[in-house]
Amino acid sequence: MLGGAAGAWAPLVPFAKARLALDDGGLGLLLLCLGAGSITAMPFAGALAARFGCRAVLTAAAIVAAGVFPMLVLAPSPATLAPALFASGAAAGSMDCVINMQAIVVEREAGAPLMSGFHALYSLGSVAGALAVSAQVGLAVAPPAIASAVAFGILIASLAAWPGLLAQRERSNAAAFSLPHAGVLLIGVFCFIVFLTEGSALDWSAVLLRTEHGARLSEAGLAFAAFSATMTGGRLVGDRVVARFGRRRVVAAGALAAATGLALAALGPGWLAGVAGYALVGAGCANIVPVLFTLTGRQTAMPESAAVAAVSMLGYAGLLAGPAGIGVLARATSLSAAIVAVAGLLLVVAIGASRLPA
């Protein structure tokens, strides 16, 4: 549901931009409201889930997400779109944080790796949402009708999920804000780096192939397509990989593979090397974040809800700040150099994986 809503919004962004006559800068500032809403809501969502249970918070967040989604295309002005985006981001951030809390509990009770499969379904939902909405746009369905259908789908999915959502509360009372313990901070920093890498693939992969390798527009987009395909495929088989090789090895090998892929994309000969490089990045990153969330649930230094919220916030911070930071660094040096710098950060994750819990 969460991935589907995110994927459904992507094809509607140009409509909202044209309807409100926004330039690229104005749209970019407004879209920051999504990230701001997510980061603001996460610590509160974790604390509320600890007190009232995952079911209550997830259901409330789904209702908000469904209620506000049509406003993303109906807002009459930027001044009304901004709070709608903030509310949508807050709902998505709350769901993202709390569903990871539930996933940790379910995986622990099952006694087997499941987290990669859960994250794979987010990826599949994103693809399904984007394709479904794009098809409706192609058939000239009015965007408000599309948005209303998405909102209805969110409500139906929430109703279908209700029996399986956890109602029990956390035994400890987690504060909304608390400084992360050193072990949780390490996991959060690794999440920051991996989310930064994923954000850079979304925003900069096509630009890299176009400007550094001379790819045509039709070829440049293949980099992110390759990244998305290998990430989704890697997550679908990730639980078996984790069970066989262990969490530390998966994080270390995945980070090393992703770093190699970025180096190949930035320095390799021609745009085909860039596509291959980003395919390797997707495969390498695929199971790092799921493993890191599993480890967040296994630590005992912090209440689980507070730890998941802290790690989620750091991850989103990397997703938001990373692409902008790459732009600043690229302006001072070159885009290839900036991408290689991200590869260097991934090497830190590969080396530091040995300090993660077993």
Image: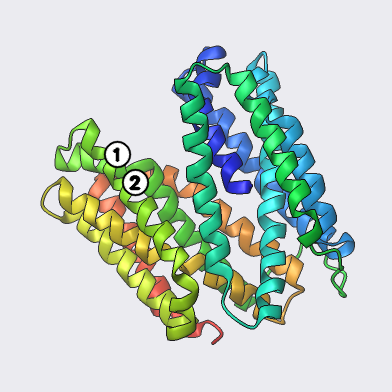
The residue at 47%/36% (across/down) is 131
Q: Judge by depth and name the residue closer to the eye, 18 or 197.
A: 18
Mark 1 vs 2: CB contact within 8 A = yes
Relative to 194, is 176 on the left or the right?
right
**Could you give the CA–CA distance between mark 1 and mark 2, rounded to whole angstroms?**
6 Å
Residue picked out by circle 1 = 221
Label 2: state its secondary structure. helix
Q: Judge by depth and name the residue closer to the eye, 257 or 344.
A: 257
Mark 1 crowdedness (10 Å alpha carbons): few <14, some 14-19, many ≥20: some
> For residue 224, which numbered disc appears in the image?
2
Q: Quadrant of the C terminus?
A: bottom right
Under mark 2, the amino acid is Phe
Vertical order, 273 against 90 (above or below): below
Vertical order, 26 against 50 (above or below): above
> Residue 43, how many percent across, how many down?
74, 56
> Residue 101, how many percent across, how many down?
71, 65
